[in-house]
Image (cartoon, rainbow, N blue to C red):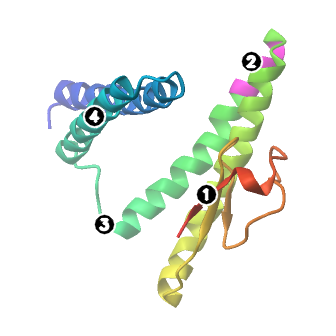
Amino acid sequence: MDDRLRDDLHQAYTGESKATLRLKVFAEKAEKDGYPALAKLFRVISFSEELHGKRALRLLKEIKSTEENLAESFESETRVAGVAYDSFIRHAEEAGDKAASLYFSQSRDVEEIHAKLYKEAMDHVLEERETVYYVCDVCGYVSDGILPEECPVCGAKKDRFVTFK
């Protein structure tokens, strides 16, 4: 594939991915503010943007075998946790922004846990083990099979965890 075209597709994928998340958050806000019709519209367009992003990924040929996808996901989480977030934390500390520093620190810690979960996932598949995951809706911490009384990253209580069976 032509390099310029690859860059264009990657930019489209990135834009569609950002729009998908942004619109989901806008839908939550509209719902809280008492605008269910607008919340629905945001969710519908978010879904449409998600489809655009999936098409771009397919054209980029970035969807490979499950084993390759798992390895890439592990490498990506490790890279983000070890390089990007450390730099972000330094910048936040230099700027004196404690909220941003806390956000980056907690996100880095959670990304490291994501990498560990990817690494363990193949063992689960080989054992044919079905796992229940619990995700902290404050910081994104993921627990594998055990609902913690309190989030080890941000301290949120167990009622803040979302269950994925």
Mark toward the start of the polypeptide (1 vs 4):
4
Residue 118 magenta-highlighted: no
Compared across the picture, whether 32 is left or right of 103 comes to: left
| Residue at the spot of label 1 | 115
Corner quadrant of residue 38: top left
Q: Residues within 10 Å of mark 4 (few under 14, many from 20)?
A: some
Q: Residues within 10 Å of mark 1 (few under 14, many from 20)?
A: many
Q: CA distance from mark 1 to mark 2?
A: 24 Å
Q: Which disc number belongs to residue 105?
A: none
Nearest to the observer: residue 67 or residue 34 = 34
Identify the residue at image location x=83%, y=53%.
152
Q: Are marks 3 and 2 in contact (CB under 8 Å)?
A: no
Residue 90 visible in the shown view? no
Where does the magenta region start and end? 88-94
Q: CA distance from mark 4 to mark 3?
A: 30 Å
Q: Which disc number belongs to residue 44?
A: 4
| Residue at the spot of label 2 | 91
Q: Nearer the viewer, mark 1 or mark 4?
A: 4
Q: Residues within 10 Å of mark 2 (few under 14, many from 20)?
A: some
Mark toward the start of the polypeptide (4 vs 3):
4
The three-letter amino acid code for the residue at tag 4 is Val
Image position, residue 127 (x, y; %): 53, 89
| Residue at the spot of label 3 | 65
Mark toward the start of the polypeptide (4 vs 2):
4
Compared across the picture, whether 88 is left or right of 69 comes to: right
